[in-house]
Image (cartoon, rainbow, N blue to C red):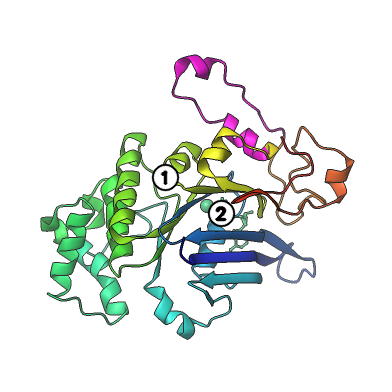
Amino acid sequence: MAENILELHDLKKHFPTTSGGLFSRRKGVVKAVDGVSLSIGVGETVGLVGESGCGKTTAGRTVMKLYEPTDGKIIFQGEDISHYSRKQMMPFRSQMQMIFQDPFASLNPRHTVGTIVGASYDIHGIKPAGGVENAVRDLLERVGLNPEHINRFPHEFSGGQRQRIGIARAIALRPKLIVADEPVSALDVSIQAQVVNLLDDLQQEFGLSYLFVAHDLSVVQHISDRVVVMYLGKVMESAPTESLFAKPRHPYTKALLSAVPIPDPRLERTRERILLQGDLPSPMNPPAGCVFNTRCWKVQDKCRSVVPEPVQIAPNHTLACHFPE
Ligand SMILES: Nc1ncnc2c1ncn2[C@@H]1O[C@H](COP(=O)(O)OP(=O)(O)O)[C@@H](O)[C@H]1O
Ligand SMILES: [Mg+2]
């Protein structure tokens, strides 16, 4: 494979907090992302999974430089953009785009589809051959919308169609990388597959790379080449999709996968579910040692004091666990 489109090296994003009001001196820090390393090859889809609150959105937004990273590196096409200013980021803005979970909240309700999708051209001072309107009509058609609806407003579309508008906007400038943050989570299950297939088609057509954030593992299994499993700001395991699903090594991965229904009813009846005890600990005060130790059924003394470093156990397969499966 050619050079990676994106590499994250020990990326951290901590949010400072003051608790107890304006004059409080008690300051804390939310370790939303606390050491994430991953790479995405050209044309590859990497799924980023983990339960709600584990730092997926923060990681995605930091990659887009919507947040300034606290520590670690973001390498985009070989260039270290970790601390680039707004101005330095300008040439990269068109190459990295984001698709959001809630297609309604991310579309301005007072703007027509034409304005929304065409805005990228104005912002980047790009004049598409044949004019903006033609380019937008092409994009609408490309994402499966009727180009005649260019003057309609977001509320005139269904949820799935609105997500298609978001996708049209994202691909307008022919980006290289798309960070998709739970792009189908808010959609009806019957619509999800259509949108996922559209993303698949666009990837083939434009050689796109995706960071695909989701908590629904069946969607991730379908679309991802590799999967990165996060828990409380850290990567627990990352592996090619097939081996991760066939043979999860981290107890947390195993627990996550055990919640996915098996399509075969006979196998589904014998599926062993692992229910994690307790809640996700606060990222303001993560457990010492392995962050998963408070909920792990294999926990031993070492897990409460020694942080397990990610170790490569097979090509493309890393694992951060003292007592793997
Ligand atoms: N801007 C922020 N300021 C403070 N804490 C935040 C901020 N954004 C997210 N967090 C916290 O960081 C943690 C990770 O959140 P998030 O990245 O949204 O997780 P996920 O997308 O996996 O659900 C949560 O505890 C959340 O409350
Ligand atoms: Mg999120």
At x 65%, y 28%, the residue is 274
Q: Amino acid at mark 1?
A: Ile
Q: Tell me the element at label 2.
A: helix
The residue carrying mark 2 has its beta carbon less than 8 Å from ligand 1? yes
Which sits earlier in the primary sequence, circle 2 or circle 1? 2
Is residue 245 positioned above or below 25 on the image?
Answer: above
Residue 189: horizontal and vertical position, in percent?
36, 35
Q: Which residue is mark 1?
A: 223
Q: Is residue 299 left or right of residue 3?
A: right
Q: Is residue 161 magenta?
A: no
* Image quarter of the C terminus: top right
Q: Which residue is mark 2?
A: 56
At x 45%, y 20%, the residue is 264
At x 40%, y 52%, the residue is 102
Residue 246 badge: none
Q: Is residue 273 magenta?
A: yes
Task: Report the residue that reaches farthest toward the bottom.
Answer: 87
Query: How packed is label 2: few (under 14 Cα within 10 Å), some, or many (20 or more)?
Result: many
- Residues in magenta? 252-277
